[in-house]
């Protein structure tokens, strides 16, 4: 079974890229983030033409998440238990059972600036995510998406460039580490080029050709899933060219 996660940074703007990628990569399940559309306006017909069922949670703002599946979709849940809002809960998490795997597609709040209300919201949201998935870590589950957190200093191109910024603070990293403390394991992908499997490169300052990246798109899985991983990688090729997302997909092969 192959599943992937990809922040597409507007599913409508990236639709040609997404469809081409889906056709080429033979994924059974795909988690998408930052849809920037509504449930009603999601291009479901185009995706279904490739054999995927769709579960979305999207309200037309800058967020929105989806799960695409060729192995069935059941028990769809939108949002987290006790989910905080800013001020109202946003479309940042959707779960579905796809064949033997329960999958969460998540888009963690950015945090904006350390000390900002949105930073506190980010930490509260991550706490709610942990509380939601913790009772299920003994089941075959995966939590995948854009976490907007680089787990270690090695996961950014230059840690000095992030001094005093979000995405690298101890509080954010501790909140993400809470998922492993709850019983999940991080699935570490390999890089197809260079040494570090970055998943995001800013559009500015020639960040992509200079490989000034960050690893912020993450996959966590329960032990019974993580132990069956046969491969995991960042598809850096999908970040190339015009009209692409600033994120690359993370692809995971498992043998449940």
Image: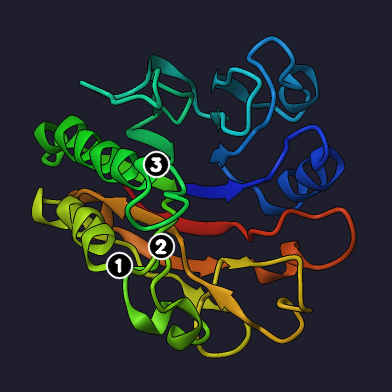
At which x and y percent is residue 155? 42, 77
Numbered mark located on residue 192 in the image: none
Would residue 223 appear left or right of 157 to someone viewing this image?
left
Instruction: Name above or below for residue 81 compared with residue 36.
Output: above
Q: Which residue is mark 2?
A: 166
Which of marks 3 and 1 precedes in the sequence? Answer: 3
Distance, label 1 to label 3, CA atoms, is: 14 Å
Name the residue furthest top: 40
Look at the picture and state if 14 lies above or below 172: above
Quarter of the figure with residue 92 = top left
Marks 3 and 2 sit apart, C-alpha to C-alpha, by: 11 Å
Badge 3: residue crowd in 10 Å (few <14, some 14–19, many ≥20): some
Taking the image as shown, residue 154 lies to the left or right of residue 53, namely left
Q: Residue at x 41, y 43 (%)?
A: 108
Q: Which residue is mark 3?
A: 118
Question: Secondary structure under badge 2?
Answer: loop
Badge nearest the viewer, 1 or 3 = 3
Q: Secondary structure at mark 1?
A: loop
User: Residue 88 sits in which quadrant?
Assistant: top left
Q: Residue at x 78, y 23 (%)?
A: 49
Q: Do the CB atoms of the residues marked 1 and 3 lie less than 8 Å apart?
A: no
Residue 171's x, y, as percent? Answer: 22, 60
Secondary structure under tag 3 reads helix
Residue under numbered circle 1? 169
């Amino acid at each position: 079974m192959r599943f992937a996660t990809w922040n597409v940074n507007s599913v409508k703007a990236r639709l040609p890229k997404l469809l081409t990628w889906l056709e080429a990569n033979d994924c059974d399940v795909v988690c998408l983030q930052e849809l920037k559309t509504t449930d009603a306006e999601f291009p479901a017909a185009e995706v279904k033409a490739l054999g995927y069922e769709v579960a979305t949670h999207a309200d037309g703002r800058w967020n929105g998440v989806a799960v695409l599946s060729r192995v069935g979709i059941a028990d769809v849940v939108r949002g987290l238990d006790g989910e905080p809002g800013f001020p109202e809960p946003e479309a940042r998490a959707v779960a579905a059972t796809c064949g033997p795997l329960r999958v969460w597609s998540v888009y963690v709040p950015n945090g904006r600036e350390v000390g900002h209300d949105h930073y506190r919201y980010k930490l509260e949201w991550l706490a709610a995510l942990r509380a939601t998935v913790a009772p299920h870590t003994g089941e075959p589950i995966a939590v995948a998406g854009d976490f907007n957190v680089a787990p270690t200093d090695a996961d950014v191109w230059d840690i000095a460039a992030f001094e005093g910024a979000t995405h690298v603070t101890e509080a954010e990293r501790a909140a993400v580490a809470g998922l492993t403390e709850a019983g999940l394991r991080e699935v570490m992908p390999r890089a197809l080029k260079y040494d570090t499997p970055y998943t995001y490169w800013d559009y500015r300052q020639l960040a992509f050709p200079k490989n000034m990246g960050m690893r912020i798109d993450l996959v966590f899985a329960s032990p019974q899933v993580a132990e069956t991983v046969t491969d995991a990688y960042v598809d850096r090729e999908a970040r190339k060219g015009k009209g692409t997302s600033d994120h690359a997909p993370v692809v995971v092969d498992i043998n449940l």
